[in-house]
Amino acid sequence: GAFQPFFRAHSHIDTKRREPWMLGEEATQLIRAAVRMRYEYLPLWYTLFFENEQTGVPPMRPLWMEFPADRDGFATDDEYMLGNCLLVHPVTDAGASKVSVYFPGGEKEVWYDVDTQETYVGGNTITIPVTLAKIPVFQRGGTIIPRKERIRRCSALGKEDPYTLQIALDKEGDSAEGDLYVDDGVGFRYQNGDRLLLKFHMKGGTISSKLVEGPGTFKTAAWLERIRVVGYPSKPSKIMLELGSTSEELGFQYQENKKLLTIRKPGVNIGAEWTINIH
């Protein structure tokens, strides 16, 4: 449910109480983790529903919708895409310890486990071990996903919280792109242009943010806290942020075993246009 459009706990005044903490400590921890994951991806969900309003394209999609040339995807009915960027394989059998995941798109595609950054090549069916704590979710190489990772009691309290960009490089380890949509979240001013639509792009060692629509009169204090680049081939010597006429060196961490580059605190307003150069 954390990776489907409709996600809620449901009860009735005449039914047995079913709050998570009524089900024991293990269930409470598992549900808490799923809810937190749901909240982390709310910026992606909001962006996908804006796309839905503009184009009619659903956020939750069968594999063949994103990979119409992949014949095997037409017969796959136990997994789905979230936008063009996440592959989700629900575990629906009680007591399951493994699932068979089909990675669509052929050998030109690469997929990254969102938890471990382990990579899988498209066109293959792989047996993936699962537990009650593991939802098999994979980010498509060549995509950029906006997330919010601060823990809050509700989404309204995280309105101005900082963003994390999760960049999964394509199979060549060279490029990725993605979108972020932001508005006030409460009214219809967005229909008059009071909104932000941003395009993120990475090519080679350059990451950029460009304003596609807005902002009109819309303002936000939310900022960019970190950028994670999965699949980056080697440790950089330095990373520079270019914002207008100013330039600033940024801190970073590189994990060789995961090919994971984390860029710390660019600190720019999420609505700003900027460029980061990795040397």
Image: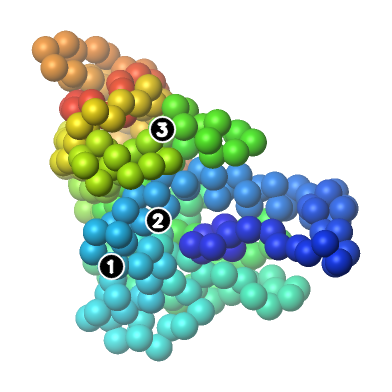
Q: Is residue 250 left or right of residue 153?
A: left
Residue at 60% from the left image edge and 34% from the top image edge: 151
Which one is in front, 169 or 166? 166
Q: Nearer the viewer, mark 3 or mark 2?
A: 3
Image marks 3 and 1: residues in contact by CB distance under 8 Å: no
Looking at the image, can residue 262 be seen? Answer: no
Q: Nearer the viewer, mark 1 or mark 2?
A: 1
State the SS at label 1: loop
Q: Nearer the viewer, mark 3 or mark 1?
A: 1
Residue at 23% from the left image edge and 20% from the top image edge: 241
**Mark 3 → mark 2, Cα distance in angstroms:** 18 Å
Which numbered marker is on residue 270?
Answer: none
Q: Amino acid at mark 1?
A: Gly
Badge 1 density bin: few <14, some 14–19, many ≥20, Cα 10 Å: few
Task: Report the residue marked by disc 3.
Answer: 163
Q: Is residue 4 left or right of residue 96?
A: left
Task: Report the residue marked by disc 1.
Answer: 56
Q: Is residue 108 left or right of residue 116?
A: left
Task: Report the residue marked by disc 2.
Answer: 139
Which one is in front, 59 or 53? 53
